[in-house]
Structure formats: structure tokens, C-alpha cells
Image (cartoon, rainbow, N blue to C red):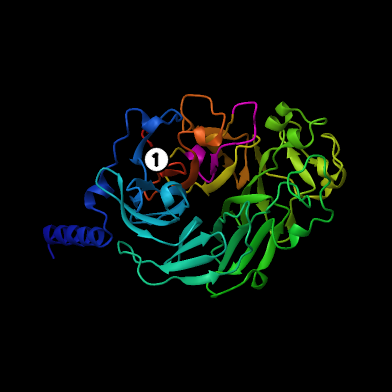
Amino acid sequence: MTAKVTKHLRAAVFAATCAAASFSVANLEAAPACDPTNGGLKLPSGFCAFLATDGIDVGKNATSGATMYGSARHLAVAPNGDVFVALQRGRGGFGGGIAAMTPDANGHLTVKQIIPAGNSTGIELHNGYLYVATVTTVVRYKYTPGKEITGDPETIVTALPEQRMHEDKGITFDGKGSLYINVGAPSNACQAQDRRAKVPGQDPCPLLEQYAGIWKFDENKLNQKQTDGVRFATGLRQMPAIAWHDGAVYITMNSRDQLDTMWGEAFSAQENADRPAEPMYRAEMGSNFGWPYCFFDYGQQKLLLNPEYGGDGKTQGRCTEFKLPVATFPAHWAPVDMTFYNGKQFPVHYKDGAFVAFHGSWNRSPLPQDGFVVAFQPFVNGKPSGKHEVFADGFAGTEPVTGRTQAQSRPDGVAEAPDGSLYITDSQKGRIWRVMYTSK
């Protein structure tokens, strides 16, 4: 066979493969162009961004005729470029689901299919399936690259406990046949009636039996209930930011609220705004991280007794018994998603480190709200190294934010694209950014 024929055959096979994956040769060969303003984002030197979509249009409201936008949470990206976004119940009557999207030659995402899966957060492509976590279930759909999702899903986990607070579920896999799900605590600090000033917490906390932990399940067994799973870790308030890395489950947790309004004589508004860190944990089987008895103080870098259990902002007490975080972030930033970077596009500094999406605070008043960022936590030799860095900022807009809905955008999901760039989702309107490194 001549070299010329071989070259033509290779080109034909390559083109056919791309066509079957609904991703053109031009998409794979040419990097998209960034927006002059980076889509409103502030990024480190050498990085740029563009809005892959300015909102996930999920159709018209049947009554008003107004356009409905999906509230984007986590996302999963296939090797061929297909993007699947978990959607929560949002404005205009849309009830959540999954947006299946594909990029055009310029990298802009187009909705190809809306799958009515219900109010969803966690989403992962794994072993030929698209796994989706609603507030009470995990289901999976058979996935064929470049094809629409068809047929009814299989239910992997069902009847997770109903709750009115911290019900969003994140998911991750260990690559050995197991699925991990967070079950948040429907409480601030385990009082018999939640968020009551100067009322002690329940001791022992009964919520720890069914909530406030990570549960482990068989990823292929159908119709499992919570009792069929194993409680892998406990003492966690709320933690949809969950990822498997280096032989363990990593979690970044939403810590407690309202130290000042619940315990004003002991904690000022400034202390409430600064003290309870959002901790990153490395969880292994049997790990206990101390909620609701303790909170990790960002300034002192110590695990302290919560005031509901006799704490005064200084005392450690029983908190010396619990596992400590491996990294910490400022109070009330509200982590929602995290991913470890495995790509080759970004500088080596980012290799194996964690990107964490924070969708911002609500209870720092009378101080301005804060934390509408994507942060990066460096890792070296499998361990966090040094302090976190603000990687992407500017989501909230240019004006101070006094209430959570005043932020123009709130980052909720982070995922790596096939070329090593980074997707970031927004829960306000379903915007999606793609961040690239251009300075070589």
C-alpha cells in the first residue's frame, strides 16, 4: 500500500470517527477563540475564557411564554466533547433534569436534548453510563457517544431520605465498582428545632444515623436503599463537592452558619463572617469529621467546640478526637463541586490539584456576601501543598453583593474538557464558561 493511499485511509477513518461522535475535525484541530473580556471573568496571567453558552434555554413557560433557563449544577464531559449538565428546579416553572449539549466549531454549546430527570446535582459518565443524582435517587442511562439518550433509566439507589435542607447529592466512583454519595444533614447544628438562639444541640445527634455522611454503594446493583449501602464517613454537614482521588474520597464541606445571630454574646458578626472554615477532607472508611459537635476555625486553624455543645470560641474539648481537614477555605464560600486536574493544557503547577466551585455566601450580613469564585488547591506528591488560590473571579459582577440572588452568576460546577481546558457552570441562568491556557 502506498504512502499516499495510507494517508487518505487514515484521514477517512479519522473523519468517520469524528462524525460518529458528532464532533467535527475542525473542533478537534482548532482551539476556540476567547472573548476579549474573558466572559467577565478574572483569571491568572496566561489564561483566557469565553462563554460557551450565555444560558441553558430549556424552552418556553406554557403560561407566560417566557424563556426558561436551567439552573446548572455539576456537569460531565465525554471524550468526544459531548457535555451533560445537571439542572435544578429554576425560575419560570422548569423542574430540573439534564441538558445534553454539543460544541460547534467555535466551541459554543448547543442544547440537543433535555432529559426530564428531576431536580439534579451530581452527574458522571462512567463505564458506558450517564449516572445522575437527584435529591432522593441515583439513576443511570446507557450512553453511546454522539447519540441521544433514549429509554428509561435504571435506578441504582432509591428512597434516600427526604429533607428540606442540604438535600443536593454529589457522586463519585472509585474505579473498583463502588459509588459514593453524600447525604447532607438537614440542620445547622443538630438542635431539636433548627436555628434557635441559645438552644443546645442534641447529644448524641440522632441525625448521624441517616444523614451527615458519605454512603458507599455497588455501582451496578439496581434498586438499592440506603440500608443496602455502607456508611463510609460521618460528621459532615453538607458536601456535594466530592471526588475520588489517590485512593480516597475528597470532600469540601459547607460549614455551619449564624454564629452571631444564634450566639451573639460570644460571637460578633465579623467573627461569624470569618471563623467557620469551609474545610477540605480526605475520607477513608470510618472517618469521622466532628459535625455537629465541632467547627474548624479558619483563623486559629483548630477544630473547636460548637456553642451548641458548650463551646466559647476557644475550647476544643472532644474535638481533639476527630479527623482534621487537609486544606481550608474562607467562611461561607459554599463549595458545590470539585474536580482534580489531569489534563496537559494547563501549566504543571495545576497537575493533580483540585479546582473547587464556590457559589457564594448568604449569611455574612451586615457584611457583604463573598465567595463567588472557583479556587484552586495545589497538590504535590498526592497531598495539598500551600494555601488555596483564587483561580476564577468576577462571577458576581462589579457591585457588592448583599444577598445571594444579587450575584450575576454563581459558579456551581467544574469539569475538565477533552483538550484539558476547564468548564465552569452557573446556577443563576445556566451560563457555562470554558477556560483555556494560551501562553506556552
Task: Choose between 48 and 63: the one closer to the eye.
Answer: 63
Say which quadrant the C terminus sits in: top left
Task: Choose between 71 and 51: the one closer to the eye.
Answer: 71
Image x and y of residue 161, in percent: 64, 63
Mark 1: few/some/many CA within 10 Å (<14, 14-19, 20+): many
Q: Quadrant of residue 375?
A: top right
Image x and y of residue 245, in percent: 57, 53
User: What residue occupies the far top of the structure in this picture?
Assistant: 399
Task: Choose between 354 and 66: the one closer to the eye.
Answer: 66
* Residue 400 shown left or right of residue 278 in the figure: left
* Residue 127 shown left or right of residue 175 in the figure: left
* Residue 343 shown left or right of residue 174 in the figure: left
> To which residue does mark 1 refer?
433
Q: Which residues are magenta?
A: 348-368
Please say whether residue 87 is visible from this viewpoint. yes
Residue ID at (62%, 71%): 225
Residue ID at (32%, 64%): 148
Task: Choose between 53 and 232: the one closer to the eye.
Answer: 53
Image x and y of residue 319, in percent: 82, 46
Residue ID at (36%, 51%): 63
* Residue 416 shown left or right of residue 247 in the figure: left
Please say whether residue 301 is visible from this viewpoint. no
Q: Quadrant of residue 247?
A: bottom right
Q: Would you place residue 200 above or below residue 219 in this image?
A: above
Dot 1: element: strand
User: What residue occupies the far bottom of the structure in this picture?
Assistant: 222
Please tell me whether residue 365 belongs to the stretch shown in magenta: yes
Amino acid at dot 1: Trp
Image x and y of residue 263, in percent: 79, 35
